[in-house]
Amino acid sequence: MELQTYTKIGVMGGTFNPVHYGHLLIAENAYEQYGLEHVFFMPTGRSPHKDGRQIISAAQRCEMVRLAIDGNPHFSCSDYETTKADVSYTYLTLQAFTQRFPGTELYFIMGADSLADFEHWLHPEEISRLSTILVAVRDELNIKELMPIREHLKKAYHAKIAFINTPGFSVSSRLIRKRVTEHSSIRYLVPDAVEQYIRQHHIYIETQ
């Protein structure tokens, strides 16, 4: 992590397996809409929510994130979770960031599907205490569906939850992996540098 002092930073967790334009759009819109000074992409190490057999190495996922965000001064990639030997839990990561950046407002960035599952994460009350949760949504219907969940989490955990308005861009890492396996094009789904890295290192060909 950088030693620079910030007032408001975003932390965007995920496996990024691989990172794609949808991730970048969410992070950029969070940065702009909430006046963040910096957004840290946080590739997971050992995730409690994912099947590790489907996830490539942390080093490869981090390198693809770095390639994807190259040239954007308000984005950076943190290897905090990938260098840990134990399972990555969001509340521990936010505790570490709170210690690293005292007095800084933390904004944890997630997708709409993650909010529905948030109550099953470890220590949601601590995540809620340490950060404002920013949830990516595509349209008013998406927001309407999420409002009851937000209200419940606010009452149960005093969660501070706000929405990130993002352009509609329907893509997933699973789709990209599938297309690579099928030798289909992934152009315009990921940055060119990420596509080149995947092709050059024959990633995902043997992982499906």
Image (spheres, rainbow, N blue to C red):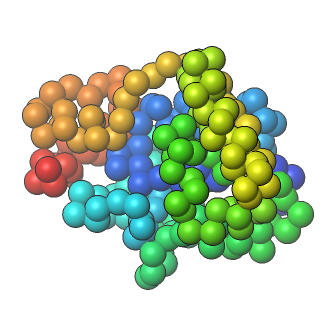
Q: Residue furthest bottom?
A: 85
Position of residue 104 measured from the top left corner of the image (x, y, whole percent): 84, 59
Position of residue 197 measured from the top left corner of the image (x, y, whole percent): 29, 45
Position of residue 16 measured from the top left corner of the image (x, y, whole percent): 41, 49
Side (left or right) of 163 relative to 194: right
| Residue found at x 54% / y 37% | 112
Report whether residue 116 is seen.
Answer: yes
Q: Quadrant of the N terminus?
A: bottom right
Q: Is residue 149 above or below residue 169?
A: below
**Near-viewer residue (190 or 144):** 144
Side (left or right) of 37 relative to 172: right
Q: Is residue 85 above or below residue 113?
A: below
Side (left or right) of 107 relative to 41: right
**Near-viewer residue (88 or 123):** 123
Position of residue 19 measured from the top left corner of the image (x, y, whole percent): 41, 43
Residue 171 figure quarter: top left
Residue 146 figure quarter: top right
Side (left or right) of 124 relative to 193: right
| Residue found at x 74% / y 58% | 157
| Residue found at x 33% / y 41% | 173
Q: Is residue 191 above or below residue 109?
A: above
| Residue found at x 47% / y 32% | 22
Q: Residue furthest right?
A: 103
